[in-house]
Image (tube, grey):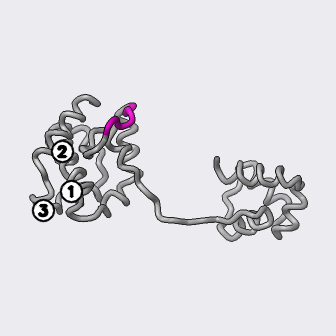
Amino acid sequence: MNYVEIIKSARRSLKMSQSELAVSAGVSLATLQNIESGRANPELATLKSVLAPLGLELLVRPAVIDLRTFAAFGLPLLGEASPPRASNVLDLIRAVQKYTPLLVRLKEGGREEQALASWLWAIRDHYASLWAHIPVPLKNWFSSRSPDSLKIKLRRLALAKLSEFM
């Protein structure tokens, strides 16, 4: 559910008209109508003003990555009984692009970091067309890894899973 649907749903459940909400929020009726129709790109302060009379608040928190998403694309994680099924290479590319800022912050020396480095190693060496779509910050992260973080066993697991997927 996006913020437009949340605002409409909350207003309707409180049996408020758009005019009543606009007055309570201190915004014009036109602004509220544009927000509810999805035509507006409100500033955070405006959005907070609209949410407050509805008993809602805006929460910004660090994004969390679910590495099981990448297990479906061949990331070799231990304990993965049955990762979700991957759909296509475009989904993999979108996921890598979306989560690159989080992937490059994985704990150094941790299991996930080793799995990611080994997975990228397999992609770089065996799937050049896919490697071409890996974002530069992630390639730079990979190239800065010490050889200790590149595990041959994990690379083999990644290759086996990638070959099933590709």
Q: Residues within 10 Å of mark 2 (few under 14, many from 20)?
A: some
Residue that badge 3 annotates: 146
Residue shown at 35%/37% (left/top)?
Answer: 83
Dot placed on the residue nearer the N-terminal end, 3 or 2:
2
Amino acid residing under circle 1: Phe
Closest to the camera, between mark 3 and mark 2, is 3
Residue that badge 2 annotates: 124
Residue shown at 15%/44% (left/top)?
Answer: 155
Q: Nearer the viewer, residue 66 or 18?
A: 66
Disc 3, disc 2: CB below 8 Å? no
Q: Nearer the viewer, residue 86 or 109?
A: 109
State the mark number for residue 142. 1
Dividing the picture into quadrants, the one containing residue 14 is bottom right
Dot placed on the residue nearer the N-terminal end, 2 or 1:
2
Magenta stretch secondary structure, dominant: loop
Question: Is residue 123 among what the camera can see?
Answer: yes
Amino acid residing under circle 2: Arg
Amino acid residing under circle 3: Ser
- Mark 3 to mark 2 CA distance (whole Å): 16 Å
Give the residues drawn in magenta, as a range. Answer: 81-87
Q: Position of residue 162 (x, y in %)?
A: 24, 35
